Amino acid sequence: MPPEARVTRFAPSPTGPLHLGHAFAALTAQERAGAGRVLLRLEDIDQSRCRPEYEDGIIEDLRWIGFCWSGPILRQSDRLSAYRAALDRLGTLGVLYPCRCRRRDILEALSAPQGVEPVAGPDGVVYPGTCRRRPLAEREADDAVRLNMGAALRLAGTLGLEETGPVRAGHHRLDPEWMMAHVGDVVLARRDMGTSYHLSVVVDDAAQGITEVTRGVDLFDASFIHVLLQKLLALPQPRFHHHNLICDEAGKRLAKRDDARAIGLYRAEGMSPADVRVMLGL
Ligand code: GLU
């Protein structure tokens, strides 16, 4: 059998300048592609936070550090109909419900006398299930749509994730009880944009034929949500490679707002792409 042509991707959200952490993620995706292809996707569904000038800067900085992607750039803002179709498909499986709760309602429900201790999941606190019995057909204009995690797990059956990364390499079985307690009913369509990071990323990884998803180890738990959605949507399941995070001197993960580590600044100071690679330990 011919060896699989690897396809990886780098998928930044243009909500700030490209910083060292992104450069590491991009170059890791490129390295993992080997003789295959690495693609570029702009995750710009959150139009309230994305800016065209960040997009231009990211593209320029990526070229400068030697990230050479194949083919056209995929923009999530052009793909809303594909996300809507995936959401409709999940709707027909009976695993979705509309949710009108705002953050404040959720915190109030959790702090009520009979409420449970809040658990932090990959998307904030685990949803207490207030709207779970509402039928999807009764979705109102400003409702979000949530995944009924219990129903989704029952329908999907046994699931696992193939990991090639440095931290947790091997096969990871998805534990339904852990998913219920630590992830819960995640939002798949936000009220303001009709989709979510989880839904869009799964639809696009399949559409772009990604064979290995490379991302930071901070997203390890989120990858279990994606494996579940891939199964429900009958999409191929890629392998995963969760890489280490680039931290500052205090050991804290670099955030987008950490502009002091922006690639553009190193460049303006006269550093070369090779210097940046050395800084990243590459
Ligand atoms: N847009 C996400 C980010 O910038 C990408 C994460 C992923 O690889 O799925 O964190």
Image (cartoon, rainbow, N blue to C red):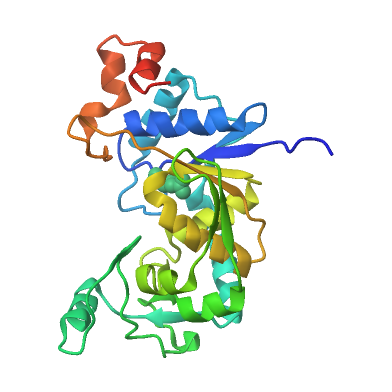
Residue 103 coordinates in the image, percent (x, y)? 23, 72
With 126 as the anchor, is 64 left or right in this view?
right
Inspect this view and state whether residue 121 appears.
yes
Residue 39 location (% of width, % of height): 57, 36
Above/below status of 280 relative to 217: above
Q: Horizontally, is 26 left or right of 236 in the view?
A: left
Label total for image: 0
- Indicate left or right for 99 with 249 as reference: right
Does 247 sit above or below residue 88?
Answer: above
Q: What's the residue at 60%, 80% (across, down)?
A: 93
Please state, as top left, top right, bottom left or bottom right, where the N terminus lies in the image: top right
Depth check: 245 or 198 in front?
245
11, above or below 238, in the image: above
Residues 69 and 175: in front is 175
State which quarter of the image contains the C terminus.
top left
Which image quadrant is residue 117 in? bottom left
Give x and y (percent) for residue 179: 43, 69
Residue 119's quadrant in the figure? bottom left
Q: Residue at x 55, y 65 (%)?
A: 229
Q: Is residue 147 left or right of residue 269?
A: right
